[in-house]
Amino acid sequence: MKGWKVRTGIAICAVFGVIAIVGPWLNDLMGLGPWKIDYQAIQQPPSAEHWLGTTAQGQDVLAQMIAGTRNSVLVGVLAAVLGVVLAVLMGVPAGFFGGRVDAVLSFFTNMFLVMPVLPLILVVAGYVQDTGPITIALIIGVFGWAPGARTLRAQTMSLRQRDFVMAMRMLGETRIRLIVVEVLPHLAGWLSAMFLHMVLGAVLAEAGLAFLGISSADSISWGTIINQAQQVALLNGLWWWFVPPGLCIALLGTATGLINFGIDEVMNPRLRTSDVKAVRKMKRVLEGTR
Amino acid sequence: MSSRTRFLVRRVGFYAATLWSAITLNFLIPRLMPGDPASVIVRQLQKQSGQSVPPESVEAIRKLFGDPRANILQQYVDYLSSLAHGDFGLSVSRFPTPVSELLAAGLPWTLMLVGTTTVLAFLLGTALGIASGWRPGSKLDGFLSPLSTFLTAVPYFWVALIALWLFGLVLGWFPLGGGYDPDLYGRSGFFGSVLYYLAMPAATIVFSSFGGWLLGMRNMMITTVSEDYVLLGKAKGLSGARIMFRYAARNAMLPTVTGFALAIGGVLGGALLTEIVFAYPGIGYLLFDAVGKRDYPLMQGVFLMTTLTVLLANLVADSIYVLIDPRTREGGR
């Protein structure tokens, strides 16, 4: 795991993770609050006092961003954990046992694969009365596992044929133990890539739901900031209000994507891009010897 | 039956089963929720119209959203028969317009928007992915793959907001919303105005979605380029372009076409949100209205309609797959 891509990705994720944890204290430390209204500074562009400017109500955008990071990251991580667990439960047995188990599990997986997830989540979230971050995360996780399950099924199928699994099977290991001890550890790379992918998917889905107005009134996330900004901010040109939340989502997503580049290259050596400089050097050396 | 027909028949069967499950989910969701959605809807209607709801309408709403007194199986049969007659119930927010009428008015706009943007994004992303994966690590690839990673992570509606602000408000190049110029309705310039109003929503969707196709194609291309038959092609002295397109890209494209199934639902979801930003008259805008006013009949109608659209799009993708995959060709083995 090296290269600038992976390092940058991990650094960005770490920054967001820390902000998500210490966010409220950070706000207190700077004397800011996401709901605090500064009547002297309404709709102000970024300045020394308000680094990211203020909203139409005179709230500090930076304070809202810091407070929103916690909920967005929370939804992302919680939904991704649930999604990965469900993907393992649906995908690994399908690949390992094959036959009828596979037929049933694969049918469900393929079904949720083609169903449009966002409208489905929306219908469910629309009926639920309390739409706090945890509820939203659970709904997103419950409907977001299908692509992961498909990948895990295919990987498990190929692992099952490998010699070391066969050997342990002949030694009389139970099937559960075979799955947990022999197969799952070899899926670690896929699982982590999947987890990161799902974090991004969940953060995006949460933002989409909040943008549509599905969020609880007292919680704040990157999505709710865009939702509140959309009309007023656009018409009055308050770009500092709606640009940061989208940018943070994109940054977090890029970071997970960059880490996944690294994971992909470890798992599939063909994807490893050759070091252009080293190749050139080698060519020069070869030409010199001719 | 030829192998092609057999493949397609199997897929059609699967899609029918999926549609049935979506309908069943739609039936179960309001009934599994705490409380009684049907009476909530009746109460909403009363508030909206200011008069009591006629008993036959109450009966129709109960049929679609559950009746705690009735047998669940009987309800299910009634529900299926309502849907079979094209009855999605009445919209609460635009009472008493039937949901089916609203969907029929919105669907063509959404199909036009999603159809054009999906094809454009697919072509653009795949072409750039071929170029990027042909020489991984090159300058072009070093620029395109991080860029696409960033683009796939950007929320559609946020790109739309920025485009609307920049090109609509600040520069004034494009209209601020709607699907056509109402002054030109039924006149000669109408078609032109439709294209003009389509330009910005379509451009933002293409911009936010081509990166996904690019990355998928790039990774497949890299894997394919190191296959033996590509090496053979090179050894035979074939031209670079011929190897790139006829040998490598053609085979690398197969999983991308299958990946279409995974992508189309996401693109549609993104397009629905984009419609809202541009007040585009498709079903995304209906959905926004429905969520804001808790119009459950409309919300569920939109879900069923999008599911149907995605399934049909998948069927089209399957048919294309059959045409380009040499393994499904008759006598090809």
Image (spheres, grey):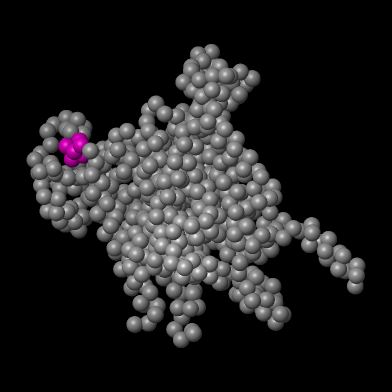
* Count of numbered labels shown in the rendering: 0
Q: Residue at x 58, y 64 (%)?
A: B220
Q: Nearer the viewer, residue B261 or A134?
A: A134
Image coordinates of residue A221 in percent, x first then y, are: 46, 32
Task: Name the residue nearer the viewer: A141 or B27.
Answer: A141
Does residue A267 appear in the picture of this structure? yes
Is the magenta region chiefly helix, strand or loop? helix
Q: Is residue A97 left or right of residue A161?
A: left
Residue A125 percent across, percent down from the top left: 33, 40
Q: State the residue lying farthest toward the bottom.
A: B331
Q: Is residue B36 magenta?
A: yes
Vertical arrangement, residue A196 with respect to residue B311, above or below: above
Percent x, y of residue A156:
47, 63
Residue A46 within the magenta-colored segment of the rendering: no
Q: Quadrant of residue B310?
A: bottom left
- Residue depicted at x 70% and y 82%: B236
Q: Quadrant of residue B54?
A: top left
The vertical placement of B129 against B34, above or below, is: below
Q: Nearer the viewer, residue B122 or B18?
A: B18
Q: Is residue B24 left or right of residue B190?
A: left
- Where, quadrant-wise, is the N terminus of chain B in this rendering? bottom left
Q: Residue at x 48, y 48 (%)?
A: A198
Magenta range: B35-40
Residue B8 horizontal/vertical position (percent): 36, 73
